[in-house]
Amino acid sequence: MINSQRRYDIDWLRVIAITMLLLYHVAIGFQSWGLMVGFITNKQSWENLWIPMTLLNVWRIPLLFFVSGMGVYFAIQKRNWKQVFTERAKRIALPFIFGMLFIVPLHIVLLQSYYSWELSYTPNPSHLWFLGNILIYIFVLLPIFIYLKNNKNKYLLIKLRRLFANPLGLIIVVFFFIAEAMIIKPYPFEHYAMTAHGFFLGLLAFIFGFLFMYSGTAFWKMLINWRWVFFILALALYLIRTYLGQIPLYQLSAESCLWIFSIFAFGHKHLNQPSKTLSYFTQGAYPIYIIHMFFIYLASNMIFPLSIDVRFKFVLVLGITFIGSLGFYDLFIRRINFVRPLFGMKRINKTLI
C-alpha cells in the first residue's frame, strides 16, 4: 500500500495542469468563438492554435479532478474527517467565496470596458467553478473515503486494489466515463464549466483519482509497464479525431482516459523527485490559478488594439499573463500573511525573505 509520503509526480502534474489551463485560456482569446464563452477576443483569429487546443481539451480538466481526488487521499492519512473537512473548507471554500466576490468581478469589468458595455459589479464563479465542484465532492464522499482508509483489509477492498493492479481493470474506469458522456450527451464535449457534464465527469475523476492512490504500488507499476500502450492508443484516437472531425462521444471519453493513464504513467516514472522549482510552484500554482484570468483580460485590453501580427500578440498576452500572475503571487500573495488564506495558502509564523 502506498503510504502518505510525498508524491512529487502528483505535485508536478498539478503544476503542469494549471500551466496548461493558463495556456488554453490565453489561446481562447484568439478563437472566433471566444466572446461566446466570456473572453475578450482578438479581431483576427489564429486558427492554427485550435490544433494543440484540441489535443488538450479532452483531458486538461479531468486531469485536475483526478489530481484533486488524489490530494484528498493524502489529506486523510494523518487526519480524521473533521480535520480534513475543516482544512479543505479553509483551503477551498474561502478562496472560492473571496474569488467570486472580489477577483472575478475585476476581470468582468475589464471585459465590459473593452467592449464599451455598461460597467457593473458581477459576482460569478467563472473559472472558479472547479472549486465549487470540489467542495461538493468532498462533502458527499468524505465519509466513504474515511471508511476505505479505515478498512484496508476488508475482502472486497482487497479485491478492488487487485482489480486496479491489472490493466483490464482500467476498462471499468473507461466504461464509467463513456456512460457519463452517453447519458449527459454534452455538446461540445469540452464544455465543462458549470455544466452537468463537468459536474459528473469531475465526480468520476475525483473518485477514481482517490482509488488510484488507494490501490497502492501495484497499480502504479502496472501503469508504468503499459505506458506506451496507453500513449499510442491515445495518440491514435487523437489523430482519428483530427482527421474525421466529428466522432462519437464514447471515442472522446476513451481518448480522454487514455491520455490520463499515460500522463500518470510517464509522470510517475520521470517526475517523482523533489526540486526547488517544484517546491516553489507547488505553493504558487493554486494562487496563480485564482488570479490568472484578471491578467489575461488586462493583457487583452492592452495588446488586442495594437496593429501587430496575431502570433506576436499571443506571445505578448501569454507573457504578460504569466509574468503578471507570477509577480502578483510572489510579491503580494505569498508575502502578506492575512492575504495568504484568501488564495488557499496557509498562514506563516515568520516573515518571508
Image (tube, grey):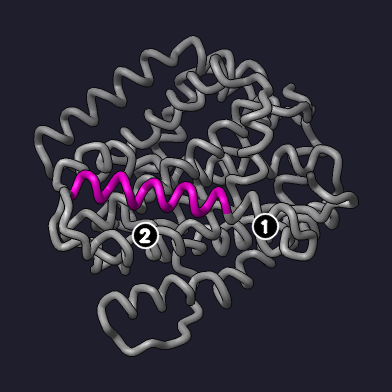
Does residue 12 show up magenta in the picture? no
Give the CA distance from mark 1 to mark 2.
20 Å
Q: Which residue is mark 1?
A: 333
| Quadrant showing the C terminus | top right
Instruction: Give the residue displayed 15% in from the left and 41% down from the top.
Output: 48
Q: Position of residue 137 (x, y in %)?
A: 61, 56
Which quadrant is the N terminus positioned in? Answer: top right
Q: Is residue 296 left or right of residue 233?
A: right
The kind of secondary structure the magenta stretch mainly shows is helix
Q: Which residue is mark 2?
A: 299
Query: In the image shown, does 316 or 209 lie closer to the viewer?
Result: 316
Residue 303 location, x and y as percent? 28, 59
* Total tally of numbered discs in the picture: 2
Q: Amino acid at mark 1?
A: Ile
* Residue placed most toward the observer, 21 or 159: 21
Q: Which residues are magenta?
A: 310-327
Q: Residue at x 68, y 33 (%)?
A: 279
